[in-house]
Amino acid sequence: MAVISPVPREMQPQYPDLTPVYRLAGLLKSVGRTADAEALKTAADAEGALEQAHDRRTDAQELYLDPPRCTTREQWAHVRAALSRADNAVAWLHSQPLANHQELMVHGVFVLLEAATRGVRTTALARGAAAALEDVGFHCAAIVLAEAPLIDPNPCISDLPRQRAAHDAAAALARASRNRGGDDADEQLRIGLVDRAHVLALQAAAA
């Protein structure tokens, strides 16, 4: 997995809402996956910062190309400086090997479900996995799984309903990732398996 530089403070995103990402990262840390948690937060920060930088550059370009008639020399200097900063921000972010935070979120869901299978805070982890799948969206998760295959989860040795449900949820995600076809039927199958994983995760959380 590529490691990217931390996003400078002035480029930190104000949107989109990264609460789901940080919630999932916290759960990953709680099961000893600190590196995965940090990679997820960094990727999400970088994607949000890139979106914001593009918006800032667009605003600055509009002022630069079509300034108000009453623009003073000082104001014009501020416009040029803002455009330069926005250009530099976009260039810096594009120079980084940006990871896909949605891919990391789906991988994180799989990690939580495997941990839940082992009986480690099964209810909380399964609930967090289900919420993260909702945040990513079943369709987006299906697209991610087609491009980033998962290994099959370890066998479940527990007969407890919660652990079995968590294992079956992880297995559904792994099965979806093995379907690499590109037609509509394959996509619908992957979406259906993600939906099933979500239902099973909720069962593991509620059992």
Image: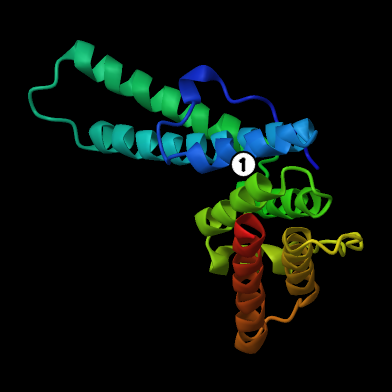
| Image-based side of 43 in relation to 52, left or right | right
The answer to which image quadrant residue 203 occupies is bottom right
Residue placed at 23% from the left, 19% from the top?
Answer: 76
Measured as percent of width and height from the top left, residue 167 is found at 79, 63
**Image position of 10 with respect to 188: above or below:** above
Residue placed at 69% from the left, 26% from the top?
Answer: 5
* Residue receiving disc 1: 24
Residue type marked 1? Leu
The foreground one among 207 and 194 is 207
Measured as percent of width and height from the top left, residue 23 is found at 57, 38
Residue placed at 64% from the left, 45% from the top?
Answer: 124
Total marks drawn? 1
Residue 102 in sight: no
The answer to which image quadrant residue 144 occupies is bottom right
Quarter that holds the N terminus: top right
Q: Secondary structure at mark 1?
A: helix
Measured as percent of width and height from the top left, residue 173 is found at 73, 67
Quarter that holds the C terminus: bottom right
